Amino acid sequence: MADAPRSLTNPYSLSDDDGYFWIRGNLHCHTTNSDGRVDPQERLDQYVAQGYDFLCLSDHRKITPVSSVNVPGDFVLIEGAELHPSNPFGGQVHHFVCLNIHEDMACGTMPPQHVIDNVNEQGGQVWLAHPHWSSINIMRDTLPLKGFTGIEVFNSTCRFMGRGEGSVHWDDWMSLEDSVYPCLANDDTHGAPEDNRDTYESWTMARVKERTTEAVLEALATGASYGTTGPEIHSIEVAPDGSEAHVKCSEARRIHAVQDAYGAEYREGGELFTEATVTLRKNAKWVRFEIIGPTGDKAWSNPFDLR
Ligand SMILES: [Zn+2]
Ligand SMILES: [Zn+2]
């Protein structure tokens, strides 16, 4: 059974005048507590030094406690883990990025729904990680489960296997459930910064009023956020009748308006632009936007429910 359609928050309706601001983070990385190359303190320090605002040390099957590292100033370190319940539906073992959990569980021997329920009972969030890399079939592996917060639309380390982007799974899932889900873009960092491989390649921007775990979690769950490998999305206004959208962004070469069926493209020949009015297909259920930057880097907005 699918949940009822949810409604997400347009982050661009949250005004600077009301105290909202953007912060940048990575919700998926590994340390020497699982198969990462650097220890937890070094992993934290590298993202702090790079100017990030929030991070989750999401080791495989094991919580790396926030209390085990020195967290500087107002940096937001979210406790969590990547959990791998068995997959009784025929596909590969599950990969769930679980945020804000504080008690380990024997996830390897638990049915996936029990893991999801346990995380939610702890006040946490379950994100479907890198579905393309995991060879996830949404109909077979994901649809029987309830209680997800959203999906990882991009994963930097999976890009090296040609399976970094999960947007087709995202669209498929929203179509099958007739609902909308928010996204994350994450490094899934395993290497050291000097490996120059899976660090600082993609990140999630969250719209918050304060630098706390609670504020970041709320922004992610309500979709007051976007994922990116570079481009910035400065504002999106969708006309009340769903006929068009006005987008402001960093320099872009193209914008894709992806809808529940089909979609639209905006471009100005080969010229770069920072503002666009995109014509949308009529009577769509939802629309999400992809901003393509000058070098092919991409940003993914969350979906706007048009119903
Ligand atoms: Zn994984
Ligand atoms: Zn991972």
Image (spheres, helix red, strand yellow):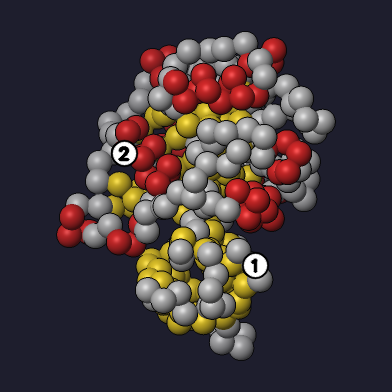
The label shown at residue 248 is: none
Relative to 210, 80 lies left or right = right
- Amino acid type of the residue tagged 1 in the rendering: Ala
Outermost residue to the front:
1
Task: Write down the quadrant of residue 175 in the picture.
Answer: bottom right
User: How crowded is the residue under tag 2: few (<14 C-alpha within 10 Å), some, or many (20+)?
Assistant: some
The label shown at residue 215 is: 2
Q: CA distance from mark 2 to mark 1?
A: 33 Å
**Residue at left 80%, top 33%?**
91
Residue 274 point in image, percent of width and height: 44, 77
Pick the quarter of the image with the N terminus. Answer: top right
Q: Is residue 80 above or below residue 27?
A: above
Viewer-closest of 261 and 106: 261
Residue 97 point in image, percent of width and height: 57, 32
Badge 1 element: loop
**Residue at left 58%, top 83%?**
267
Ligand 2 has an atom within 8 Å of the beta carbon of the residue at disc 2? no
The label shown at residue 261 is: 1
Residue 207 point in image, percent of width and height: 34, 50
Asked whether residue 107 is in view, the answer is yes
Please count the marks in the image: 2
